[in-house]
Every structure is written in structure tokens, then in C-alpha cells.
Amino acid sequence: MATISKLSNPSPAVSLSAPSRSSSLPKVFLGLSTKTSFSKVRLSLKNTQPSSRTSLVGNGSPIKRTTLHDLYEREGQSPWYDNLCRPVTDLIPLIESGVRGVTSNPAIFQKAISSSNAYNDQFRELVQSGKDIETAYWELVVKDIQDACKLFESIYDQTDGGDGYVSVEVSPRLADDTQGTVEAAKWLHKVVDRSNVYIKIPATAPCIPSIKEVISLGISVNVTLIFSLTRYEAVIDAYLDGLEASGLSDLSRVTSVASFFVSRVDTLIDKMLEKIGTPEALDLRGKAAVAQAALAYKLYQKKFSGPRWEALVKKGAKKQRLLWASTSVKNPAYSDTLYVAPLIGPDTVSTMPDQALQAFVDHGSVARTIDSNVSEAEGIYNALEKLGIDWGSVGNQLEVEGVDSFKKSFDSLLDTLQEKANSLKLVSL
């Protein structure tokens, strides 16, 4: 890795001093039992590709082009950042480097809020005003989301709602609650009150109907925790069903992404292959996730074509883009761009945490790769099945683990906030 250097340090281009909108927490969030700080990414621009074009930042300094700009402009893939914390103005140099959106989840906020003092003043005001711990948590989150939406607003406007989104997830405790998820999504959409917010809903079986209903209400959704092709197809159908049920004459402002998780698939399947132990099995390590992702893109192309889709296009509907999530490499033996470089294709999003983002800017190459060898991907997928790998079981296990992980992060953060409130003698037990 080349020496890491900060991109730039411009004066903030927007003011974030406006007060956050507030709203009462719906009952669905209440009555439930409770049981790295945002690192300032300093991307290396040492290996950026030359360009005759020069952009300017707000203070007049030139912006160095990166592979992220080329990723979007040449191949139609939007690079997003998978992290969020205060101060959100730390996102400005990332935006200048080519980042076009932000994703968050309960684990990200758990790390951000529990390890930073930046939330203390607002938290103190909230609990002193009589807010309970969970209500205070959501107000902290909503402010971050609103402030980040402001930073990406110009990208949203410039692309006519095609990009510039910030994602916030409903409570992970609702992963098995169809109607509770709908109510939570409606509340978050209302309280954030930003056109470029995505409400994240998990792709659990109980939440598939939730996705349809929320889309039908005109609320844009990031469907998260997708681990299998079968569940991904159900997610697409829920999006299409929701658009058709909406009754809206103009569907252009109802958009969605489907977050298909990548690296976790290899983490689990590699363990299975090592247990099998044959040369054939061992040779397939590190190949399952990208192969399945390539087949997901093939499914995407199939589903968003034909008479049904064309009828929705006439009303302004936009494709539900595939978003590659879990793009950080867990196995140090693998290339640090393994879950970014082979998954480049038009109308897709790649959301990258610090490690993956730095690696791709430093030495990533830009070329359409996602459908460059679909037959090989099909061969790998089928070979794994022949070895006894049940893709449905893999997807179900990863989904359960993903939901449980987010629940633990959520509960841990509420416990941390309660302890912080107690230490400040702000809330009595």
C-alpha cells in the first residue's frame, strides 16, 4: 500500500447548523427489552489515472481524479462509502475523491457513538429533556443521516435522483415483524425528511412483504442482508409488486437498491470446503462469492427487461440497482480488491468500508468485469453444489448471523448509552 495521505482539507461547502427535525418515536420502537470511531479516511492518490479534466473544490483548489471517478464515468458503477460518524464533514474529501453515497447499519452506529465524545452534548440535552435511551439513540442517528444527506444533496440533484443517497436501517429487532418494519420505515422516512434518504429493510422472509408495502407508499428502500439468488429474486419481485401497487402516475422518485453481500459468503463456504478437504474443494476457496454475485447480475438483467418492466418504465420507474455489500476482504491471503474489482458493471453500486476503499483507490483497475465470464461463474456455482454445498442453507445461515450481529450491536449501544446516562446522573433507573 502506498503511503496514505489526506485528500484535501477544504472549507465545508455546506452549513450543517440547522436544527434536526424531531418526531415522537412510534410505539413499534418502544417496550422492547434491551440487553472505530469514524476513521478519517486518507486515501492515497499516488496512482490516480491522468485526465485532461480538472475539477475545483469549494475553496478553488484542484481535485485530483481517482479511480472512483473513472468507475462511475466509464463503467456506470457508483462507489459509496460504508461508514458514518461525526463530524459528517469528514465526508467532504471522500466526496471529492469520487464517493457518491453512504451506507450505515447498527454496527456502524454502535462503533461510532460508543467510541466518540462528539455525541455527548446532544445526548445530554436529549436525556435531560426526558427522552428515554432508545428515543435518544434514534435522534442521534437521525441528525447524522440528515447532515450526510445535505452533503450528498447536490449529487442527488445532478443525477435526477439517480445517486447521492444516504441509508439508515430500521431497528434490527424488527427483522421478523412485517408490519412493525413497515411502521418503522414510515416513521424514519418522515422524521429524516430528506429526498435522498434510503430506508434500509432486511431481506428476511417476514420483511419481503414489508418491502412491497413500503415501496407502494412511495418510500425509497435499500434492501439489505441478501445472501442468495433465491432471496434476491424475491426482493426484485417485491420491488416490482410495490411499484405496480403504488397507484402513482410518476414512479421516477421511488428508487431502490438491493444490497447483495459478498465476502461473508466466502468466509462460510471456505470453511465448508476446508472441511471437505479434497483438492477440488480446496481449489474453489475464495471463488464462491464472486461467482454467485455474477449470477445475481445476470438475474438482474433478466428481471429488469421484458413487457412487465417496460410497462413500469413508461411510468418513470427506475431499475432497482444491485449494490455489492460486505466488500472488505476477511482472508489476508486474498487480494484486497477481491470483492470490488471483479464486480464492476453498469447500473450497480459498490459500497466500501475504509480498507476496501483505500485499496481500490490505491491500486484498483477500472474495467467492466461483472459479466466478463458468466459461464465460468455458473461452473463454479454448480461445482460447489456437486460438492454438497447447499446455497439455500448458506444464505439462511448468513442471514441469521447478520441479523443477530446487528441486534447485538444495537443492544450493546443502548446499554452503553444507558451507562453513559447513569455516569452523568442524567437518568435514574
Image (cartoon, rainbow, N blue to C red):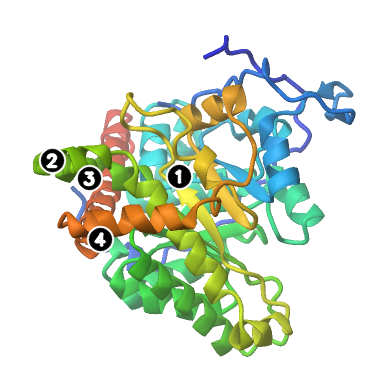
The residue that disc 2 covers is: 278
Q: Residue at x 30, y 72 (%)?
A: 205
- In this view of the protein, which residue sits in the foreground, 60 or 112? 60
- Tell me the tag on residue 195: none
Residue type at mark 2? Thr
The residue that disc 3 covers is: 268
Name the element at disc 4: helix
- CA gap between label 1 and label 4 equals 46 Å
Residue type at mark 1? Leu
The residue that disc 4 covers is: 391
Residue type at mark 3? Leu
**Mark 2, other Cα within 10 Å: few <14 / some 14–19 / many ≥20:** few
- CA gap between label 2 and label 1 equals 58 Å
Name the element at disc 3: helix
Residue 216 placement (x, y as % from top left): 54, 81
* Comes first in the chain, label 2 or label 3: 3
Q: Where is residue 390, by image quadrant?
A: bottom left
Q: Where is residue 5, by image quadrant?
A: top right
Residue type at mark 4? Trp
Placement of 9 over or under 395, stated as above or below: above
For the residues bearing labels 1 and 4, Cβ distance under 8 angstroms: no
- CA gap between label 1 and label 3 equals 42 Å
**Mark 3, other Cα within 10 Å: few <14 / some 14–19 / many ≥20:** some
Q: Which residue lies furthest to the top in this view?
A: 3
For the residues bearing labels 2 and 3, Cβ distance under 8 angstroms: no
Name the element at disc 1: helix
Residue 138 placement (x, y as % from top left): 44, 51
- CA gap between label 2 and label 3 equals 17 Å
- Mark 2 or mark 3, which is nearer to you? 2
Placement of 258 over or under 425, stated as above or below: below
